[in-house]
């Protein structure tokens, strides 16, 4: 279970709209509860460093992720996950997402339609990055799985 | 003794510690010590064969060990070692970015000087081969960019140009030769590119870039190189690049000076952050009006080509947020910091421009005048002027060209006042007398005629087509330049 607080959620959606029609990406910072529940309290927008067309690809520069990790330590938080957007397409975990993911983090995918938020999902890749489990996601826009569609 | 920071998700495998201090002399030793007694942690970082997993990056302080000595990178007391995963993805199905199978033996030989540079290598050369670059304009800047990008092995080059090669282009537009005069620039450019590198696919766009066609044309390319010579197209290229999220590799030239930068790169500024408004029409002369040192576009174009290659490779530090200024006379480069303007109407936080607009209107240039340089108005043609001169007409013939142009050729009995001096030398002109203004092409003189009319002079006529038309229609002994 991952819960995203209002402030980081608003920042993530604003970031996704801003970069539309390109994909955005960023880091989610927060805490891990004893019960395994994660709470995101801060979102850090990162630059999409993918060298080609960014309409359907993103890449996080490792140096930026290192800086996010440092910011997390400084604020006594943890790097919980990575978010990115899928402009004009559903929030599924694509083969590209899976193969370039990392099993240590939660991956939130935001679907945008015409520049506005549509729905979102969260995924947990397995160690070999061959499949990903969907992680229940709770955010100010409600129970996200409501929007899930094909 | 170096400190290794443990990413949160791995802490349960490292005794819940957020960092561990270990005695080791290299990164390899350090990671080995860290994971030796912890199979679970080892599995997260290493493959069963004992290699670091492909998504794991290791940093010593702020430096990726791949740029140092990899696992042999020494660590000293006080160093901090961080483990950072590579993360990427996107909605695109994995196979759309599938690498072009490989390079042929011929290509391997052709690109061998690239392949042996670590920053390029086979991977980089394949990136170049997969890259799609759009050149707007095959003129002064477009020529060197096209030549070198083709030679470097950029797989697909789109060229937008509807012009024809003119004798006066040859001084700088080196992709065209003397035998190409009168041919379409596209034909001549494509032929030269084929000869340089037959592996390059060239897409031809024989059209002016317009608000109607810019998005569909740009959409298929990874980045755009701006080699345009006018403000409406420059703003159009900028806005289209921002809207589509494509980097805009910008260059501009005038006489001995040039500028280059990369606009619309994620997080960086765009052309409108630098110049929110175009200059008043006529204030900044084009190369045709103001002249340009022939070698200048070679240098600025190659700065653009270099930045293009770097962006494709993801190598080095791109010219983003920095405007490179070059002065050929003093042979100096300077750099100006540029920042993205949060208030920018197109790339700012609350953009007001969300689609392409009418750029001729925005720049105050009527579309008809932009397409057809002939000035309109109560003007006079070369033959009419000749007839009136022959009849001994009583009017002032005013030449508004620069002194060095007047040395090349002139019309009989003309008064010389360079355009920029006209406003402060109005006292030398008689308000009651008819004035005929001319310049090289009729463009500058049209502006001066308009200006004089607005100042209350009259009648003021512009010689349409300028000296060029005069030479064509009246006196071929007058040289065209």
Image (cartoon, rainbow, N blue to C red):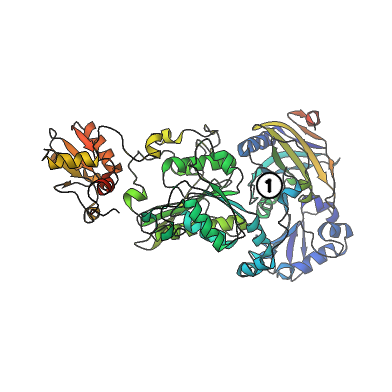
Tell me if residue B72 comes above or below residue B369 in the rendering: below
> Callout 1: few (<14), some (14-19), or many (20+) C-alpha neighbours within 10 Å?
many
Picture quarter with the C terminus of chain A: top right
Q: Is residue A89 left or right of residue B41?
A: left
Res B479 quadrant in image: bottom left
In the rendered view, does B400 fall on the left or right side of B347?
Answer: left
Residue at coordinates 22% horizontally, 36% vertically from top-left? B461
Which x, y percent locates residue B37?
88, 63
* Residue A12 shows in the view: yes
Dot 1 falls on which chain? Answer: A
The quadrant of the image that shows the N terminus of chain A is: top right
> Which x, y percent locates residue B233?
46, 42
Count of numbered circles in the view: 1
Asked if residue B23 shows in the view, the reply is: no
Q: Nearer the viewer, residue B13 or A61?
A: A61
The front one of B473 and B199 is B473
The picture quadrant where one finds residue B57 is bottom right
Residue A38 placement, left or right of B157? right
Secondary element at image label 1:
strand
Residue, disc 1:
A58
Q: Nearer the viewer, residue B230 or B378?
A: B378
Residue B60 percent across, percent down from the top left: 69, 63
Report x, y in % for residue B149: 55, 58
Q: Nearer the viewer, residue B199 or A39?
A: B199
């Amino acid at each position: 279970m991952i819960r995203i607080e209002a402030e980081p959620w608003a920042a993530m959606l604003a970031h996704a709209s801003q970069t539309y029609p390109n994909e955005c990406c960023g880091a989610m910072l927060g805490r891990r509860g004893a019960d395994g529940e994660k709470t995101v309290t801060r979102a850090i927008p990162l630059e999409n460093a993918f060298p080609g067309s960014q309409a359907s690809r993103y890449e996080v520069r490792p140096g930026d992720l290192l800086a996010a990790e440092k910011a997390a330590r400084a604020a006594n938080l943890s790097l919980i996950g990575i978010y990115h957007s899928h402009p004009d397409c559903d929030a599924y975990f694509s083969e590209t997402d899976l193969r370039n993911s990392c099993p240590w983090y939660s991956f939130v995918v935001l679907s945008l339609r015409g520049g506005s938020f549509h729905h979102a999902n969260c995924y947990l890749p397995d160690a070999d990055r061959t499949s990903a489990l969907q992680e229940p996601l709770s955010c100010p826009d409600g129970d996200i799985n409501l929007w899930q569609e094909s | 003794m170096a400190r290794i920071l443990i990413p949160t998700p791995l802490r349960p495998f490292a005794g819940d510690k957020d960092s561990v201090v270990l005695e080791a002399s290299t990164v390899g030793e350090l990671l080995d010590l860290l994971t030796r007694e912890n199979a679970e942690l080892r599995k997260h970082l290493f493959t069963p064969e004992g290699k670091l997993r492909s998504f794991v990056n290791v940093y010593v302080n702020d430096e990726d060990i791949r740029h140092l000595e990899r696992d042999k990178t020494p660590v000293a007391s006080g160093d901090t070692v961080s483990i950072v995963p590579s993360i990427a993805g996107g909605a695109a199905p994995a196979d759309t970015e599938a690498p072009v199978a490989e390079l042929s033996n011929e290509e391997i030989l052709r690109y061998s000087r690239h392949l042996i540079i670590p920053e390029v290598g086979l991977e980089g050369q394949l990136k170049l081969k997969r890259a799609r670059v759009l050149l707007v304009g095959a003129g002064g800047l477009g020529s060197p960019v096209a030549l070198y990008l083709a030679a470097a092995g950029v797989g697909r080059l789109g060229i937008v140009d509807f012009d024809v090669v003119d004798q006066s282009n040859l001084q700088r537009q080196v992709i065209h030769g003397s035998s190409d005069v009168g041919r379409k620039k596209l034909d001549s450019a494509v032929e030269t590119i084929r000869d340089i590198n037959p592996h390059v696919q060239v897409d031809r766009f024989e059209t002016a870039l317009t608000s109607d066609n810019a998005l569909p044309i740009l959409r298929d390319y990874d980045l755009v190189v701006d080699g345009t010579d006018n403000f409406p197209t420059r703003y159009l290229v900028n806005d289209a690049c921002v809207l589509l999220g494509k980097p805009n590799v910008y260059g501009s030239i005038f006489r001995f000076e040039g500028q280059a930068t990369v606009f619309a790169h994620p997080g960086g500024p765009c052309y409108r952050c630098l110049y929110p408004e175009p200059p008043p029409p006529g204030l900044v002369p084009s190369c045709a009006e103001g002249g340009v040192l022939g070698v200048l576009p070679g240098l600025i174009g190659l700065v653009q080509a270099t930045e293009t290659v770097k962006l494709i490779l993801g190598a080095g530090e791109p010219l983003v947020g920095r405007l490179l200024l070059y002065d050929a006379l003093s042979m100096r480069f300077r750099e100006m910091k540029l920042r993205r303007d949060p208030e920018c109407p197109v790339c700012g936080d609350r953009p007001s421009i969300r689609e392409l607009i009418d750029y001729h209107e925005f720049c105050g240039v009527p579309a008809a005048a932009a397409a057809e340089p002939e000035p309109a108005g109560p003007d006079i043609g070369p033959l009419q002027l000749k007839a009136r001169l022959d009849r001994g007409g009583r009017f002032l013939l005013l030449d508004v060209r620069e002194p060095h142009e007047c040395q090349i050729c002139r019309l009989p009995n003309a008064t010389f006042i360079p355009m920029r001096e006209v406003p402060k030398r109005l006292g030398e002109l008689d308000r009651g007398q008819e004035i005929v203004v001319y310049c090289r092409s009729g463009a500058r003189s049209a502006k001066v005629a308009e200006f004089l009319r607005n100042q209350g002079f009259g009648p003021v006529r512009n010689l349409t087509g300028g000296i060029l038309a005069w030479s064509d229609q009246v006196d071929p002994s007058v040289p065209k330049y």
